[in-house]
Image (cartoon, rainbow, N blue to C red):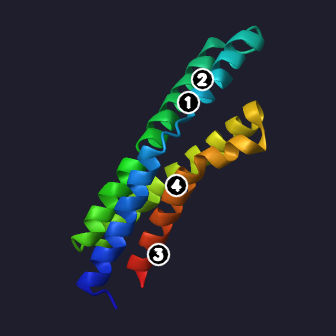
Amino acid sequence: MRTPVRLALSGSVCVVGGLLMILSGVVAHGFLPKILDFVKSAVSDMTPHSAYVALSIVIQILLFLIGLGGLGVIAGGVLIALGRITTGKFIVALGGGAGFIGLAIALAYAFYTAGYSSILTHAEYWIGVLFAALGRHYAHK
């Protein structure tokens, strides 16, 4: 049953998750532009300019979505707490999905550059994504 207290708690959990995602400072701005630089330098002779431009646009869109993941989770949590459950859950799913993408990229980059030990530095981000998923799930019941 969706009681106001349950919705407020669910929304609060999402807001905390979004704040953790933002405060963790995990940003994929180091990894994705390196992919773009690699494409530009290593395979620029074989790749047409239009493909490079298209890849650049896709990477910029991904960076934008990853950066907005935490804000989306916060906005969705507020909407859930205000009773806009379907819209709030949808926005949390978008923000959390971007969060999972960001986490995967950050983990891959951390593992590539520093090994297993640096993966633990992203624990706050992972906890934030889990809070977002839990808050969304709790609003569902």
**Residue in front for this viewpoint, 81 or 128:** 128
Helix, strand or loop for disc 4: helix
Which residue is identified by label 3? 137
Find the distance from the CA under tag 4 to the CA under tag 3.
14 Å
Q: Identify which amino acid the numbered label 2 is placed on.
A: Pro
Helix, strand or loop for disc 2: helix
Residue 109, image x, y percentages: 69, 35
Which residue is identified by label 4? 97
Find the distance from the CA under tag 1 to the CA under tag 2.
8 Å
Find the distance from the CA under tag 1 to the CA under tag 3.
30 Å
Which of the 4 image quadrants contains residue 45?
Answer: top right
Helix, strand or loop for disc 1: helix
Tags 1 and 2 touching, CB below 8 Å:
yes
Residue 99, image x, y percentages: 52, 50
Q: Residue furthest bottom?
A: 1
Q: Which mark is residue 33?
A: 2
Eyeballing the image, is 90 above or below 40?
below
Eyeballing the image, is 50 above or below 20?
above
Find the distance from the CA under tag 2 to the CA under tag 3.
34 Å
**Residue in front for this viewpoint, 8 or 64:** 8
Q: Residue at x 48, y 71 (%)?
A: 134
Q: Residue at x 69, y 37 (%)?
A: 110
Find the distance from the CA under tag 4 to the CA under tag 2.
21 Å
